[in-house]
Amino acid sequence: MTAALQSPPRTEPAAKAPSRRKRPRTHPLRTVSPVSRAFVLAVMTLFAVYFLLPVWWLVVSATKGGGEVFSGNGFWFGEDFALVENVQTLFQAQGGIYARWLLNSLLYAVGGGIVSTILASMCGYALAKFSFPGREAVFGTVLAAVLLPAPVLAIPLYLVFSFTGTINTFWAVFIPSIVSPFGVYLSRIYAASSIPDALLEAGRMDGAGELRIFAMGVRLMAPAMVTIFLFQFVAIWTNFLLPSLMLADTSLQPVTVGLVGWRELQGYPIGYSTVVTGALVSVVPVVAMFLSLQSFWSKGLATGAVK
């Protein structure tokens, strides 16, 4: 008797999993409804008008005569276009002291901006490319200093400079201006991302000193350095509290402190139109600096935001 051979059960092939169709990816901006887009555009327009209205008032008021600044429509030109006469009166008032204030502001802002940029770049480069004990603690201290409001330090700085006998001198405003924690922060981020370690190793193998290697890295850090200089220039130019505390001599004051002193004269002997014209002229160097360095600072700021 022979055992009947049984054929193995036939197994059905496994059913294929249904393939998922890939949905076509749409551009994020195309998914926004027209109502939302119109709302965002309206809000942005409202804020733009809010910020530009004071500037427009300043430009219009500087073209008016002495008796028209606070009369009529404040946001439109007066009967006479007196901008040239107002500028002439501005630079002749009190023996031409406004030109001295402009020169003081340029010395404080340009000198302080250059020195603070160099110091911040060197500190940021060292924090990014050198390993030493306590490096992260130092960087954490720098970050804490970025969050610290500058007016908080005004009174302690006044006490320190009063103890050293440098109150009412050029150095009482210049020395605090060369410190920039934000510059150190941005320099470290930019140096870590833009300067390769191979460049440093190649320079050391060729026998170059650390200062020469840093000079090579400065070329790669140029956009960040321009950004630091521009931010520090604006911060020093618009600073009011520190110079008003440190300086009593009007010939050493920057333009911000001098204009406030004119305004406190209640319109006599310096008219309000002269004060308004002085405010408009004081904005011109800042705008010129922003426009001339626009390509550099926008690139450096974008790199800091991404990293």
Image: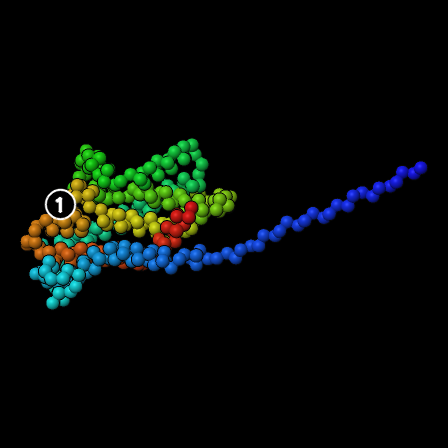
Residue bearing mark 1: 249
Q: Find the residue positioned furthest to the right.
A: 1
Which quadrant of the figure has residue 148? top left
Residue sitting at x 20%, y 36%: 155
> Disc 1 marks which amino acid?
Asp
Count of numbered circles in the view: 1
Instruction: Give the camera-side residue of 251 and 235.
Output: 235
**Residue 212 visible (yes or no):** no
Along the horizontal axis of the image, is 50 left or right of 264?
A: right
Residue sitting at x 27%, y 50%: 234
Q: Position of residue 261 (x, y in %)?
A: 12, 49
Q: Position of residue 223 (x, y in %)?
A: 38, 52
Location of the N terminus (image quadrant): top right
Instruction: Give the camera-side residue of 164 and 50.
Output: 50
**Residue 235 visible (yes or no):** yes
**Is 142 above or below relative to 251?**
above
